[in-house]
Image: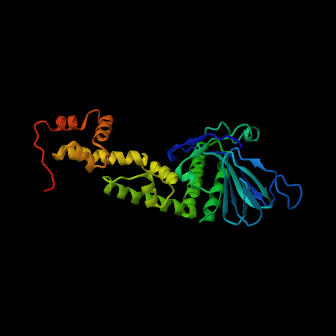
Amino acid sequence: MVSILQRSISLDELDPRVLNIGYSAGSGTGVRSPGARTPERFAYDYEIEFFVAPGGQMWVDGTGYAIGKGHVILRRPGQTCNSLPPYTCWYITIDPTGDSGKTLDDFSSTRYLSFQAQIRNPAFDAIPAYMKVQDESAYIDCFSAINLLARSKSETDRLALRIRLLELIRLLCADAARGPAGRAQRQSEEAVMDTLDYLHAHYAEKLTLADLSNRANLSPIYFHRLFARMTHKTPALYLQQVRLDRARDLLLHTALTCSEIAAACGFSTPSYFSMVFKRQTGMTPLSFRDSHLAGSPVKAERSP
């Protein structure tokens, strides 16, 4: 097993480059006799194949896929792959961020020198190894244009090439979002959003990761990862922030004691509330109240 560098990026950081592109008309490579599978190899870069006719098979990390018309294969750096030709496809190798050190001109000599980093981005991560595309003609147009533009030295053509490469990535992301994996992802995100609403309404209660993940019908590990990706905070830190925000409001707009506020906001003890509050604001709850309300009347909100 090879170790591949993982690199998180935003879509704004995409600056794709073509490393290799072509059209395979029903032959395949590396086959010495009919019906023979090609030797297993590593993908060192991002490799995309779009099939324009049925026939043949592909394996990615040991999983086999029967090739159909209008299907696409995406291989990521570090994955193993081999195939059973014949098949007819457009193929392209890309460097999504443009900083691998490889180019179209020297790809034959640099291809196996190093693995690209695997880029991590929610939209890019959602693209499966194999899927059916919605608009085959859009892919054909994209591959054809990239093939024509790839070796041009014209600055205008280089700009057009970048636009087409980004369009290819957009097509892949859009088709992935429409597929089963994309629908499942959206359902999971909606479940997390529902959990956020629940958390804001029930912050005063004892809430655990298990409680929240069960409510979302997701595993605790997956819920934690998805929650953090969507909110940029872990569930525990997010809940703590909601409680602290409410505590600030009660300190400024009620005459409740610190013990009463701690209980009303879901903190286990007044001392824990004071410790967390001071860690974030640099002052105790009482000092915070005094510094903001010196000379101002405080309206009590005690229950009768």
Quarter holding residue 127: bottom right
Measured from the top left, where is residue 33 in percent x and y?
A: 89, 58
Q: Residue at x 89, y 55 (%)?
A: 32
Left or right: where 210 falls relative to 116: left
Q: Residue at the far top: name it.
A: 282
Left or right: where 235 falls relative to 71: left
Measured from the top left, where is residue 206 in percent x and y?
A: 35, 52
Q: Is residue 160 visible?
A: yes
Q: Residue at x 15, y 45 (%)?
A: 255
Measured from the top left, where is residue 12 in percent x and y?
A: 50, 45
Measured from the top left, where is residue 130 in percent x and y?
A: 66, 59
Q: Is residue 66 above or below residue 93?
A: below
Quarter holding residue 199: bottom left
Left or right: where 97 falls relative to 90: left
Q: Which of these two is toward me, 291 or 151?
A: 291
Q: Is residue 179 visible?
A: no
Q: Quadrant of the C terminus?
A: bottom left
Q: Residue at x 60, y 48 (%)?
A: 161
